[in-house]
Image (cartoon, rainbow, N blue to C red):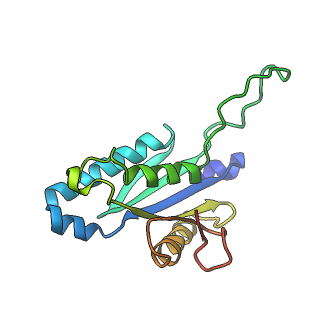
């Protein structure tokens, strides 16, 4: 439905697919209860980083999807002569990078004091209409960026389709 709306109103939709690097290791080392808490805190932290209208969902296991979309047209200043500077809106890539940094910070408490700062994520991003025209193609493009960009490139990164000349995009 969001892509249909984007087609009609001509705005971009960005899909971020990400997973927790080496999640099985955390389950094995800390137990499944801690693993479940990691998943809960991951979703809550991503919701805090994203905008109210963006969609955050757990797909399966440690895999998540975030749909970033613009629910309003660009803002037009009421007074074009005003000199105050409004807060610059954050792009989906900036939001994803902030989330990536926060998940490995002291603020992420699920691993306890000994494990803080060790959790990382890898993600792939694709943008409608530039990288794909259908929901399935958008998912496939973001997944390629995740698997062949972020994972193959060493993990703990977000790859945006088209950021580099390689197959998966480039690191951000």
- Residue at figure coordinates x 70%, y 45% from the top left: 9
Q: Nearer the viewer, residue 59 or 36?
A: 36
Residue 123 against residue 90 in the figure, above or below:
below
Position in image of residue 31 (x %, y %): 14, 62
Is 124 left or right of 91, judged from the image as shown? left
* Residue furthest to the right: 81
Q: Which quarter of the rendered picture does the C terminus lie within?
A: bottom right
Residue 146 against residue 30 in the figure, above or below:
below
- Residue at figure coordinates x 32%, y 60% from the top left: 118
Residue 95 against residue 53 in the figure, above or below:
below
Residue 1 in sight: no
Position in image of residue 74 (x %, y %): 72, 37
Position in image of residue 22 (x %, y %): 31, 70
Is 61 left or right of 161, judged from the image as shown? left
Which quarter of the figure has residue 89?
A: top right
Residue 41 in sight: yes
Is 111 left or right of 54, judged from the image as shown? left
Position in image of residue 21 (x %, y %): 35, 67
In this rendering, the count of numbered labels is 0
């Amino acid at each position: 439905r969001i892509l249909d709306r984007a087609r009609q109103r001509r705005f971009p939709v960005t899909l971020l697919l990400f997973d927790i690097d080496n999640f099985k290791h955390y389950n094995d080392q800390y137990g499944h209860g801690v693993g479940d808490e990691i998943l809960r805190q991951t979703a809550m932290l991503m919701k805090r980083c994203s905008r109210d209208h963006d969609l955050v969902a757990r797909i399966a296991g440690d895999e998540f999807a975030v749909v970033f979309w613009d629910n309003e047209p660009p803002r037009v200043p009421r007074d074009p002569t005003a000199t105050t500077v409004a807060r610059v809106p954050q792009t989906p890539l900036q939001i994803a990078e902030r989330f990536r940094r926060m998940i490995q910070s002291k603020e992420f408490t699920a691993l306890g004091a000994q494990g803080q700062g060790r959790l990382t994520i890898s993600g792939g991003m694709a943008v409608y209409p530039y990288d794909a025209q259908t929901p399935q193609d958008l998912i496939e493009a973001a997944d390629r960026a995740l698997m062949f960009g972020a994972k193959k490139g060493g993990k703990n990164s977000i790859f945006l389709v088209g950021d580099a000349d390689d197959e998966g995009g480039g690191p951000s």
